[in-house]
Image (spheres, rainbow, N blue to C red):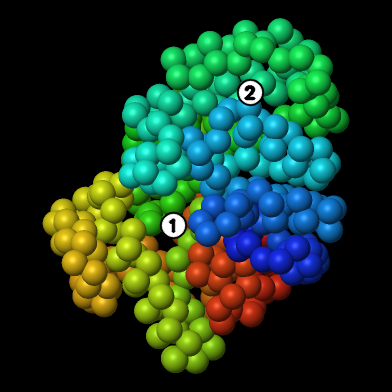
Amino acid sequence: MKIDCLMPAAMPAEVAERSKALETLGFDGVWTFEATNDAFFPLAYAAANTTRLELGTNIAVAFARTPFAMAQIAWDLQRYSNGRFHLGLGTQVRAHVERRFSAAFEHPAARVTDYIRCVRAIWDTFQNQTRPNYQGPFYQFKLINPFFDPGPITQPNIPIYLAGVNPRMCRAAGEVADGFHVHPMHTAGYLRDVVRPALDEGARTRNLRVSDMSLYSPVFVITGETPAEMDAMAKAVRKQIAFYGSTPSYAAVLEYLGYHELGKKLGALMREGRMDDMAAAVPDALIEHVAIIGQPHEIGAMLRSRYAGLLDRVSLYMTMGGEGNFTRWPELIKAIHTP
């Protein structure tokens, strides 16, 4: 199992310093995310200041960029990092894609599989000078000339991860992706009973299995050196679970756990702006199912015990690349890496 870290956007010098520190500590990879800032920009600085650390997006919004634009920036980062880049994509939700990004969203699972196939066709042309001839149901790539072709790179096989929660998107990832970004709103049982079987079903369409894919997830963790620190982290995790639970996309996880009406209740509270009431509505038992809860020295072993055979890579969600109270990184990294 590998241990990664989430890294928020920051000034270039801070990104450089942080990425070097993560590599020195022994982290395997670092993931940026697309929220208030672009997900790709920090990775150029991380690539320039490290030699071993794997670098990726978790996630970049696929439909916000054309396949060619996505293929081009991924190609650049793969070149700059000497083959350490992982392209993590997600579909986001309809409201944001249509009303924030001004892009098309209909048939998201079918659209994103076509998108990924188009990106790979573009990479094939970059690397092998193949004639552009991709025509899918949503995207096409049929034109290029030398002025727009960046040419081959030494390590052209860029892993593509796709994010999802529901079985249909999991199956889509199995059909076309090299890896899968598991949402932090999950349980071990949901991975075992829903996510992995759906990934496997999709992977079988290309004569692969879920075991041929890499599964990564940030994990909600509640820990601290003092009761006050644990309480603060528990409050933050409760609020985040309430936020995710209010979104229909995560209803499948709640229903799997038997909370059939909780999502509707949280959604109604969200629409009324009652954020404190949302957090209070999350049952303690749900938090215990979703989060790892323990003393700092226990967290590494607990992560490994829960996710062995289910995930290939993990990170701590609430630390967000170093923020928060957790400081036992060498101990945690050793526990994750120890078979």
Compare residues 189 and 170 and report the one nearer the observer.
Answer: 170
Compare residues 192 and 74 and report the one nearer the observer.
Answer: 74
Q: How far separated are the C-alphas under marks 2 and 1?
A: 28 Å
Task: Reply above or below: 264 against 231.
Answer: above
Relative image position of residue 121 (x, y in whole percent): 64, 18
Q: Amino acid at mark 2?
A: Arg
In percent of the image, x 55 and y 35: which residue is there? 65
The disc, 2 or 1, on the residue closer to the chain's N-terminal end is: 2
Q: Amino acid at mark 1?
A: Pro
Q: Circle 1 is placed at which residue position?
A: 184
Q: Which mark is residue 120?
A: 2
Relative image position of residue 197 (x, y in whole percent): 39, 35
Q: Choose mark 2 or mark 1, whichever is in front.
A: 2
Task: Reply above or below: 154 against 127.
Answer: below
Does the rendering let one see residue 288?
Answer: no
In percent of the image, x 43 and y 84: which residue is there? 232
Residue 264 quadrant = bottom left
